[in-house]
Amino acid sequence: MNTIAVRVSHAASLTHDIRLLELEPVDGGHLPEFEPGAHIDLHLGPSLVRQYSLCNAPGRATRYRVAVKRETSSRGGSWAVHDTLAVGSRLDISPPRNHFPMAPQAAHSILVAGGIGITPLIAMAQALLSRGESFELLYFCRSPEHAAFLEILQSPAFGSRCRFLFGLDRDAVATELEATLAAAAPGTHLYTCGPRPFMDTVTAMARARIPPENVHLEYFSADANLLGAPSEAFELRLARSGKAFSIAPGETIADTLRLAGVDVETSCEQGICGTCVTDVLEGTPDHRDCFLSDAEKSAGNCIAICVSRSRTPLLVLDM
Ligand code: FES
């Protein structure tokens, strides 16, 4: 796997539970360029790889910036960032990947952040500001003390483009969104990132006002309902090698293939990053990821093999 060796060049607390890291290449070379919305993998330990959005302002980066919230339900990633990394620590990262790209010619962009979901959106806000494009940012958060990057977003450069909405309940969030979306001009694109229930509210509100192809989502976590749905055994065939496997209930395609010595590339293993998406040649996938769009899921010609399964007794992959 292609990785870049970096060291932590700066670390700071943005709030009591959000930590900012700056990462610079160990060899002093350049870091690959990236577009707003991109993320990198942090290799935090054996089998501990986590994805974090880049928060950088636009322009050639000599350091990558990520901001990580300490999650009480951490599977190890946020704990490692908060408790084991310090200035001088070395780690490997992946080159940036972007599954949350911005539309090239939006008439207007609405960025809707829920809590730590601000991380990809601050990169977008800074890019839109520097390009002189029309946008507004709604930052929903529990309180000012819980909000990251206020210094940047409240700076005069952003003027009145950023609105800070603290401590609102679900109904009040919906009311605010309704008012913003009611004024959305044709050609508006909406980008949202945050906790799943928050994003569900945003997408439900956006559905009536903005075409689905103009609504862009970045999930942080898997959909527990989808992952926990009942599963049945099915046959898997790899078209290129002709190998066949039986996928038992409770086993994933990726794990089964890996155990059999087949080279499989995965990252999040939760159906959120898209690394493992593979073409389907025959059969109907039972999609359990939150990476593929509704249109891609309906088309049924690709599958996230780390979590998704098959609705048909046989599934044939282009591997
Ligand atoms: Fe991330 Fe499968 S590894 S979606």
Image: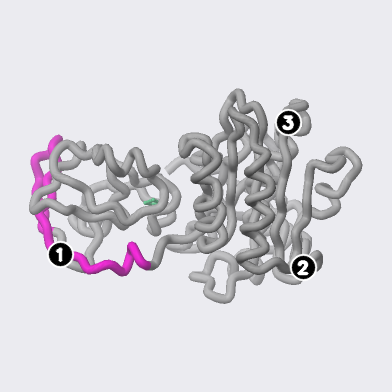
315 relative to 291 in the view: left or right: left
Disc 3 marks a residue whose amino acid type is Ser
Tag nearer the camera, 3 or 1:
3
Residue 76: x, y in percent?
Answer: 52, 69
* Mark 1, secondary structure of its residue: loop
Residues drawn in magenta: 225-246
* Mark 3, secondary structure of its residue: loop
Label 1 vs label 2: CA separation? 45 Å
The reply to whether residue 155 is in sight is yes
37 vs 144, nearest the viewer: 144
Mark 1 or mark 2, earlier in chain: 2
Q: Which residue: 47% across, 35% down?
A: 213
Judging by the rendered image, the residue that carries numbered circle 3 is 134
Mark 2 or mark 3, earlier in chain: 3
Tally of marks: 3
Judging by the rendered image, the residue that carries numbered circle 1 is 232
Asked whether the residues under the numbered discs 2 and 3 touch, taking CB atoms below 8 Å apart as contact, a structural biologist would say no
33 vs 278, nearest the viewer: 278
* Mark 2, secondary structure of its residue: loop
Image quadrant occupied by the N terminus: top left
Q: Is mark 3 within 8 Å of ligand 1?
A: no
Disc 2 marks a residue whose amino acid type is Ser
Judging by the rendered image, the residue that carries numbered circle 2 is 143
85 vs 37, nearest the viewer: 37
Query: Is 284 covered by the magenta stretch?
Result: no
Residue 29: x, y in percent?
Answer: 67, 34
The reply to whether residue 26 is in sight is no
Label 2 crowd bin: few (<14), some (14–19), many (20+), radius 10 Å: few
Outermost residue on the top side: it is 105
Outermost residue on the right side: it is 156
